[in-house]
Amino acid sequence: MSAATLDSRRLGNGVFQVDFGGNWTVGAALPDLSAALREMGSSEQIGGVRVSATKLGAWDSRFLAQLTHIIDHGRQQGIEVDTTGLPGHVQELLRLAYAVPERAGARRGESRTPLLAQFGANFLALLDDSRAFVEFVGLGTLSVGRLLTGRARFRRVDLLQIVQECGAMALPIVSLISLLVGLILAFVGAVQLQMFGAQIYIASLVGLGMAREMGALMTAIIVAGRTGAAFAAQLGTMNVNQEIDAFKVMGVSTFDFLVLPRMLALITMMPILCLYAILMGIVGGAIVAVSFFDISLMEYLNETQRVVRLRHFIIGLGKGAMFGVLIAIAGCLRGLQCGQSAAAVGSAATSAVVTSIVLIVVSDALVTLVLNRLHL
């Protein structure tokens, strides 16, 4: 296989000659074309460029790419490029390549947005999201008002189905996570409590932690990833299939028919799931205390009953109901904002989970701070 060659020289009549030879194929070492291009643009005495391939062997798209570089460079310099010395099939490919001119703006330039502009764009996007969230909350309040006055229109079977999906179907994963969280809390607390011979207070730590915080928080995160994303995907798919537009054309309130059942289902089931998660966490702590730290089951239960009061359960269940509202709003909002493509549905589901978790953590921190200041 002969190596690729490139011979460039200036003829006496002001014509610049470029002659290709050898094999111009993938894997072959190709000569540098930059020197010939520089010579074409450095002299004002060049009246034209003649391209020939008298000794050309095998070639592929790399050869055509080099030819287009020469032709484009000559056009930029205002120099006519003569390709009649090339084989006929090469000329035909070049003719097809330049038959349709390149659309203006088709190539993407490397543009970097200034840091201040990025900050401004992100701030405006945050304002838009906040405005949309407040508007969605207002629409939800009006929809609940219509429900209380008997004017909300939705199918009861849809509500029961959503209740089953976000309630009973979530019990296995809630059981597993809550049990493990109880185990982890017990082990983490026991490391320090054992130093003082106060292993009995493992029950207090696990009971209060699960009742006030971890039961509602872990359940909300599980439901956000499981149910909130499902809400966004369902409504997003309906938006892609133009089913939501069909509801609007028929005069059916999409908020009452689609969003309200999902909000009611989560408001109803989240406190129940939180109560179940609290009990499973206490069971996990009991397993650790009884199995590893010589605490009897009755001692553990008595200590839990002594420390954990009804108000602690009420705080945890109240947080659960609040988290359920936030998850439903975030999931339905992102679903209704979904675009008209499959990728947009995936983005809506991802955004729903992220928004839900952010709202859960922020609201939990605020409620905990308020309760601390009220000494509850």
Image (cartoon, rainbow, N blue to C red):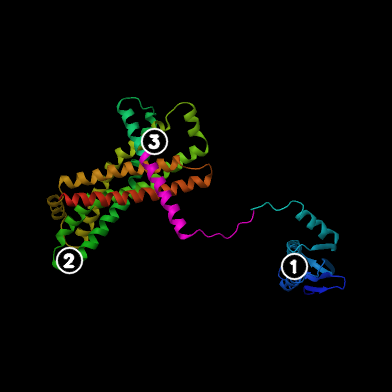
User: Percent from the top left, x then y, of residue 220?
Assistant: 32, 48
Q: Dot 2, how many residues are within 10 Å of its Cα: few (below 14), some (14-19), or many (20+)? A: some
Q: Is residue 174 visible?
A: no
In space, the residues marked 1 and 2 are separated at their CA atoms by: 74 Å
Q: For mark 3, does the 10 Å Cα neighbourhood hold few (<14), some (14 to 19), or many (20 or more) residues?
A: many
**Occupied quadrant, residue 156:** top left
Q: Residues within 10 Å of mark 1 (few under 14, many from 20)?
A: some
- Give the residue at x 44% y 58%: 116
Nearer the observer: mark 2 or 3; the answer is 3
> In the rendered image, which residue does mark 3 sit on?
259
Q: Position of residue 321 (x, y in %)?
A: 28, 42
Which sits earlier in the primary sequence, circle 2 or circle 3? 2
Per the rendered image, the range of residues in magenta is 106-135
- x and y percentages locating residue 289 in the rendered image: 20, 59
Question: Which secondary structure, mark 1?
Answer: loop
Q: Amino acid at mark 3?
A: Val
> Where residue 25 is drawn, which disc sits there?
1
Residue drawn where x is 43% and y is 43% of the image: 334
Q: Quadrant of residue 261?
A: top left
Relative side of 235 to 25, left or right = left
Q: Which of the marked residues, 1 or 2, is nearer the chain's N terminus?
A: 1
Q: CA distance from mark 3 to mark 1?
A: 61 Å
Quadrant of the snapshot with the N terminus: bottom right
Amino acid at pointer 1? Thr
Lower sequence index among marks 3 and 1: 1
Q: Nearer the viewer, residue 104 or 367?
A: 104
Q: Residue furthest front?
A: 44
Q: Which residue position holds label 2?
A: 194
- What residue do we see at 13% from left, 55% from top? 299
The answer to whether the residue labelled 1 contacts the one labelled 2, judged by CB atoms less than 8 Å apart, is no
Magenta stretch: includes residue 133: yes
